[in-house]
Image (cartoon, rainbow, N blue to C red):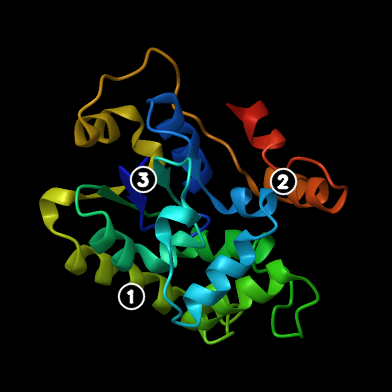
């Protein structure tokens, strides 16, 4: 397998909905942060990549045709060079809504404290460094978010990039990917409540993707 789709959009921009949409379109399995929970070795792969170590991307994405969300969104440029035939999707949403959502979910933890698990250590390096550990500073976080999106629009050739809001539905996504529009609704999942439910599932040793699957 080789990646066909690379998501450049940061977490909380509809990436779980996009993951499920790509899988419905036959472009899965799609890697997402929830996949990291399933593979005990995964946090180490991403932490090493964040430290600049050579990365065997074929090993990281073995069995996957697409990737969205963190941690891969932090490496979209490298991945776009590694997989030159892959298309790139930049998921976006209103910056204020994005910030509010992050504070209720992925940034609700205090990652400035010493990590207690490999996953927390990975998040500190892959995500925390991007924000200089200032994830709760509204103006700073939004500026990083907007800069990331602007850089993606510049770094990726226009014909290879789709800037996309999941609220736009199937039409622009399917047109960009060259596939037919399904006769089922576009997935809309991963509200803040669903996100917290998945974290609770992880803490209980359950499959964190179960809640998302129910929303499909």
Disc 2 packing (10 Å; few <14; some 14–19; many ≥20): few
Whichever of callouts 2 and 1 sits on the residue coming sooner in the sequence is 1
Q: Is residue 69 left or right of residue 106?
A: left
Tag 2–tag 3 contact (CB < 8 Å): no
Mark 1 residue element: helix
Q: Residue visible at 67% across and 39% down?
A: 209
Q: Reading the chain from its start, which is encountered first: label 1 or label 3? A: 1
Along the line of sight, the residue nearer the viewer: 88 or 189: 88
Q: Is residue 94 visible?
A: no
Q: Which is more toward the observer, 43 or 159?
A: 43
- Residue 3 percent location from the top left of the image: 34, 46
* Image quadrant in which you'd find residue 134: bottom right
The answer to whether residue 151 is above or below residue 195 is: below
Residue 170 occupies quadrant: top left
Viewer-nearest residue: 93 or 195: 195
* Distance between mark 1 and mark 3 Cα atoms: 17 Å
Which residue is the site of mark 2? Answer: 193
Q: Answer left or right for 110 relative to 151.
A: right
Q: Is residue 12 visible?
A: yes
Residue 210 placed where, x, y %?
Answer: 71, 34
The earlier-in-sequence mark between 2 and 3 is 3
Spatial distance from mark 2 to mark 1, Cα to Cα? 28 Å
Viewport quadrant of the N terminus: top left
**Image point 76% across, 52% down: which residue?**
199
Q: Nearer the viewer, residue 164 or 59?
A: 59
Q: Residue at x 38, y 55 (%)?
A: 92
Q: Residue 69 vs residue 204: left or right?
A: left
Residue 46 - label: none
* Residue behind mark 3: 165
The residues tagged by marks 2 and 3 sit, at their Cα atoms, a distance apart of 20 Å
Residue 147, numbered circle: 1
Q: Position of residue 5 (x, y in %)?
A: 32, 45
């Amino acid at each position: 397998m080789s990646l066909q789709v690379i998501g450049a959009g940061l977490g909380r921009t509809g990436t779980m909905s996009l993951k499920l949409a790509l899988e419905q379109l036959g472009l899965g399995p799609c890697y997402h942060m929830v996949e990291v929970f399933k593979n005990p070795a995964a946090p180490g792969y991403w932490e090493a990549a964040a430290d600049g170590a050579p990365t065997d991307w074929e090993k990281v994405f073995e069995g996957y045709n697409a990737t969205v969300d963190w941690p891969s969104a932090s490496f979209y440029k490298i991945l776009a060079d590694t997989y030159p035939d892959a298309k790139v999707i930049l998921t976006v949403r209103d910056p204020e809504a994005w910030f509010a959502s992050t504070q209720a979910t992925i940034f609700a933890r205090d990652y400035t404290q010493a990590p207690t698990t490999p996953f927390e250590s990975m998040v500190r390096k892959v995500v925390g460094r991007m924000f200089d550990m200032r994830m709760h500073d509204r103006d700073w976080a939004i500026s990083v978010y907007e800069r990331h999106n602007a850089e993606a629009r510049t770094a990726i050739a226009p014909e290879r990039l789709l800037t996309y809001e999941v609220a736009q539905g199937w039409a622009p996504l399917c047109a960009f990917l060259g596939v037919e529009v399904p006769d089922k609704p576009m997935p809309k999942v991963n509200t803040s409540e669903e996100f917290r439910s998945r974290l609770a599932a992880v803490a209980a040793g359950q499959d964190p993707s179960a809640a998302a699957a129910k929303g499909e």
